[in-house]
Amino acid sequence: MLYSKRVTRALFALICVFVCLISFNSLAAAYADERELYLGGFAAGFVLNTTTVEVVGICDVMTEDGIESPARDCGIKTGDIIEKVNGYEINSVSDLNAALCIPSKNCTIQIERGGQSIDMNINPALDKISGQKKLGLLVKDSVNGIGTVTYIDKTNGTFASLGHPVADQSKKIMQINGGSIYTCAIYDVKKGLRGNPGELKGSIESDYMIGKASKNCECGIFGEISSDFDTSGLKKIKAAKINEVKMGKASIYSTVEANTTKEYEISIVKIDPLNKDNRNFVIKIDDENLINLSGGIVQGMSGSPIVQDGKLIGAVTHVFVNDPTRGYGISIDKMLNSY
């Protein structure tokens, strides 16, 4: 009798958990359906703060005794990542400047090169004009580029873009410490050719901020949209689950000319819901106007939303190097569940 009661209680507990999971999933699906999504397709300029300081050049320092270059003398090279100075961790240019201001008899610098940490002795030079210690380095702690916003979610005040991560030179997802996105004026397009990908050329309008970037992941760049961003000119749209997507006609929305977001005809030629690299669709550009303008998919179009039967199904992510009229797309399910 006691054994029977224990079994009954265990079964009852399992049933409760199962029901709760079903309820949770139903609520999550309902929330996704209720999201107030607005279709993107417009170009944006991204300025992302990295968590590393990279050497982009070696320069000279003018001292009372003449020209010196401590970095060149100790063997620092372009592409090195500065990890520490005198034991202090360096995550930004301001960290580097602060470390050089701390009095010390000897100065050591730890850099990362090719995946290995290297310790070096370096003698900072006293700049004749500013009176500050300098290493003779040109460094950066941010990256910038052009991409496309996929959607804006007014329900929680967020945006999604790119559909793929921003990666470093070793193809690892770059860790970011915030950033900003701005409006971007597209002034030209380099046409994509077989074996030679094209690109959108534009200028970042730093006076017009769209939002703050906070996450760089496998599914793109996400963040908070500015509270005063005007969505009145954008199309409100619902998202489709990947099992609703079918082979055949669809559209992408992108900004390629005249700073105007336009709809272009494409075809979905392959669907791969479980692809581990988030290449859930293979798309083919059918629109002759877009092919004449850009050759097909070019850099900067990443994040262009893909729409089928009036619903948002995903975003453009990559172009086939040997065929710019074809490329990959990520499902909108993946993007919605990433932030």
Image (tube, helix red, strand yellow):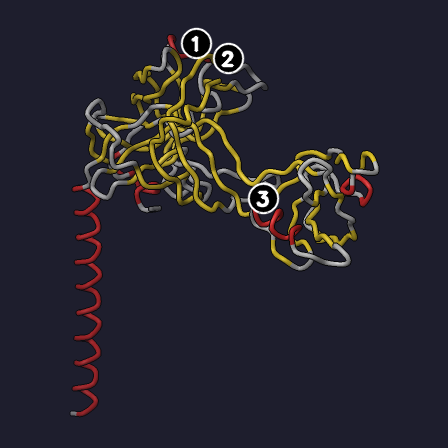
The image quarter in which residue 63 lies: top right
Amino acid type of the residue that numbered disc 3 sits on in the rendered structure = Val
Residue linked to disc 2: 191
The image quarter in which residue 75 lies: top right
Amino acid type of the residue that numbered disc 2 sits on in the rendered structure = Lys
Residue linked to disc 3: 93
Q: Which of 227 and 241 is in front in this view?
A: 227
Mark 3 / mark 2, whichever is N-terminal? 3
Q: How crowded is mark 3: few (under 14 residues within 10 Å), some or many (20 or more)?
A: some
Residue 316: image tag: none
In the image, 21: left or right of 252? left
- Foreground mark, 3 or 2, reads 3
Q: In terms of secondary structure, where does tag 3 sit?
A: helix
Q: Does the residue at mark 2 contact the one at mark 1 (Cβ under 8 Å)?
A: yes
Residue linked to disc 1: 293
The image quarter in which residue 237 lies: top left
